[in-house]
């Protein structure tokens, strides 16, 4: 988590400390995303009121700890949002607790990742 914290802005550090998530702005669209603590199904696209609307799932290659996954997600969205979303799996957000992990609708829990462009969309079986 040390490396992740070093890359967070002061505002993101405060969010992560208080809520267990931090927000990033996509470089291509200017959309706001919330990255929750976790290694999969932990990226939420927010609406204009700051409410989660869509879930995105993409992870870096390899088996990494959550902090490293979250850092890769942050960098991807802030520097190449379209490429990150091009390999991501989109899923509907269901739930009212913004701190909790997203529940998937009509899917089983994630098991492994596919291989495209260095980032992996989450594949469910």
Image (cartoon, rainbow, N blue to C red):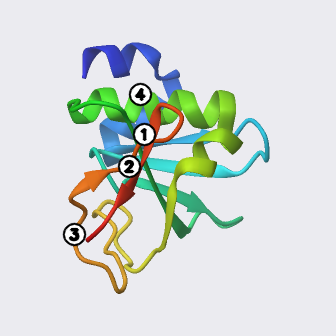
Answer with mark 4 or mark 2, whichever residue precedes in sequence: 4
Number of other residues with Cα within 10 Å of mark 4, as a class: few under 14, some 14 to 19, many 20 or more: some
Answer with mark 2 or mark 1, whichever residue precedes in sequence: 1
Number of other residues with Cα within 10 Å of mark 2, as a class: few under 14, some 14 to 19, many 20 or more: some
The residue that mark 2 highlights is 114
What x and y, as percent, mark residue 91? 47, 71
The residue that mark 1 highlights is 15
Find numbered disc 2 in the image and state the secondary structure of the residue it sits on.
Answer: loop
The image shows residue 13, relative to residue 92, as above or below, that is above
Q: CA distance from mark 4 to mark 2?
A: 19 Å
Find numbered disc 4 in the image and state the secondary structure of the residue it sits on.
Answer: helix
What x and y, as percent, mark residue 71? 41, 28
What x and y, as percent, mark residue 8? 47, 23
7 left or right, relative to 51: left
Q: CA distance from mark 4 to mark 3?
A: 23 Å
Q: Residue at x 46, y 74 (%)?
A: 93
């Amino acid at each position: 988590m040390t490396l992740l914290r070093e890359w967070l802005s002061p505002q993101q550090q405060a969010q992560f400390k208080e809520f267990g998530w931090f927000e990033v702005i996509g470089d291509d669209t200017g959309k706001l995303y919330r990255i929750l603590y976790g290694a999969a199904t932990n990226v939420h696209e927010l609406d204009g009121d700051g409410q989660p609307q869509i879930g995105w799932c993409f992870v870096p290659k390899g088996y990494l700890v959550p902090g490293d996954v979250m850092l890769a997600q942050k960098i991807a969205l802030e520097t190449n949002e379209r490429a990150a979303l091009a390999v991501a799996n989109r899923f509907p957000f269901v739930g009212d607790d913004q701190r909790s992990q997203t529940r998937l609708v009509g899917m089983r829990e994630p098991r492994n990742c596919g291989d495209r462009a260095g980032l992996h969309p989450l594949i469910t079986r």
